[in-house]
Image (cartoon, grey):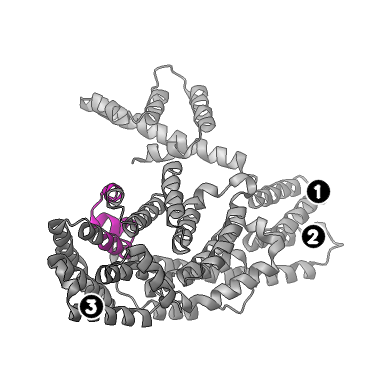
Amino acid sequence: MNALQEIANMMNEAEKKAFIHYLSKKNKRKDTGNIDLFNSLKTDDIKNKKNNLSNKKSTDAYHALRKRLYDNMIDFMANRSFENNTSQENTILRLIVVSRLFFEHNLTKTAFKCLAKAEEIALNIEGFNLLNEIYLTQIQFAHFNLSEPIEKIITKFKVNKKQLEYEEQLNLGYAVLRRELAAIYHEGRIVDFQALIKNTIETHGISLKKGLTFKSLYQILFIANEYASINNNYSIIQPFVVKSYRFISKKNNQTDRHLYYHIYILYFIANFYFRNGQFIESMNYLNLMFTELQKQSGKYYQRFCLRYFILLAFNENYLGNPQKAIEIAEKSLLSNKKADPNDSNDLRLMLIVFYIQQNAGRNAVKEMAKLNHTDSWYEKKMSMDWAIKKCLVEILLHAQQENIELAMSRIKSFKRRYKKYLLTVNEERVVEYLLFIEQYVMKPEIIQIEKFQKAIDDFIIRAQNGPKDILIVSFLSWLLAKVRRKAIYETTLNLLTAYFS
């Protein structure tokens, strides 16, 4: 998708009409062509327009027109965002700017009132960077207000400066760790992430004992959540979750001011409880999350809805309501086509797993066909871990559908692509698991041999004694169901009980 199309997709119908009006007012000639080009974006006809321009002169003219349209779209969206932005941060910025204007025109009393109002709002939203600007402006023009002791302003400035410096250090540490996570997930980089976290915390002077804000708690929880995901062990981040709950409870009156981070924190906590098999607790936090998604006219609904539905469907599935889980997943994919593609891929892969558990092979095959990019593409766009899981699910689906050649082809491809990486990151159990699947695909009757059955039982016991992660259960259950000749879903629920006991 090109940049013009991506920006156009951000616009609702009212904004598209407003943009066309904006172009009409700006155009000095009737044959400019920018409105026609913009309209072609709505009908996906832009490629045809480009192909119709055959000679070099016309092609150059097309690219020039495209560049001008792109620049106009950027200007329009920037102006629109500023005009429609009613956030408290924007209100504070406006008050700071207008206060400086008033100072220049000797309207000092009004200027100080604007700054006082800006300070009040900034304190409520913990906007330390904005408070820094407010206090600097108050200090700069303190000679206009002799009744206010300058020492009092300087003290507030210094206290806020410490908070701002801590926030900056945390932002730097967060940026370093997120960048490293991206390399781990999308490039398969081998990193001792625990050591990296420790080193980053020490380098940037990050302390969890210092006062938390919604933003800093979100950043800490994000890193903790990703660390748990890499280690397939969510029990290790329980202290962060407990601290998060206490923090929200104490600052419940501020949650609406930090809605974006509040929703994210609730999602992290719900995900933690789900991955540890505590489905009722997870559902409780999902209910809180859904309530927050409705606030401020559903401002963040599109941003988070698929993540909410993914966790909701997962919980329903493992609570013993598989059809309800499937309905949630199917409906969510149909009604949220413009949501984040990564979330859509997660939801689709989850739905395929549900279909496999219910022995609905045809439905699973249809959905798997929609995940039609290469392994390399999924590694870069999703993550190495996600691509590995997708390949394993595909292998299980082919095995279940008795597509022996396709299953063996994917197994060989998987070993060529991922075996060395998995051994390097100490995930020998995935390689061992694949060996069992390969033996079963090549010789299905092997499940009747006692030695093979015992090997599977021993493998599952070892897996249960390792890091706890509910998603691993789904893979183990498929294999165990084949050995015991039981239904996959029933086996999954039974194994869950033992797994988290």
In the image: residue 420, left or right of residue 464: left
Tag 2 residue: 143
- The residue to which callout 3 is attached is 453
**317 or 374: nearer the viewer:** 317
Amino acid residing under circle 1 = Thr
Callout 3 crowding tier (Cα within 10 Å): few <14, some 14–19, many ≥20: some
Residue 442 point in image, percent of width and height? 12, 66
User: What range is drawn magenta here?
Assistant: 365-393
Quadrant location of the N terminus in the rendered image: top left
Query: Residue flagged by tag 3: what amino acid is it?
Result: Gln
Judging by the rendered image, the residue that carries numbered circle 1 is: 110
Residue name at image x 26 percent, y 73 percent: 430
First along the sequence among labels 3 and 1: 1
- Frontmost of labels 2 and 1 is 1
The answer to whether any part of residue 204 appears in the image is no
Foreground residue, 226 or 97?
226
Disc 2/disc 3 C-alpha distance (Å): 85 Å
Q: Nearer the viewer, mark 2 or mark 3?
A: 3
- Residue 183 on image: x %, y %: 33, 66
Three-letter code, disc 2: His
Label 2 Cα neighbours within 10 Å, binned few <14 / some 14-19 / many ≥20: few
Secondary structure predominantly adopted by residues drawn in magenta: helix
Q: Secondary structure at mark 3?
A: helix
Mark identifier at residue 432? none
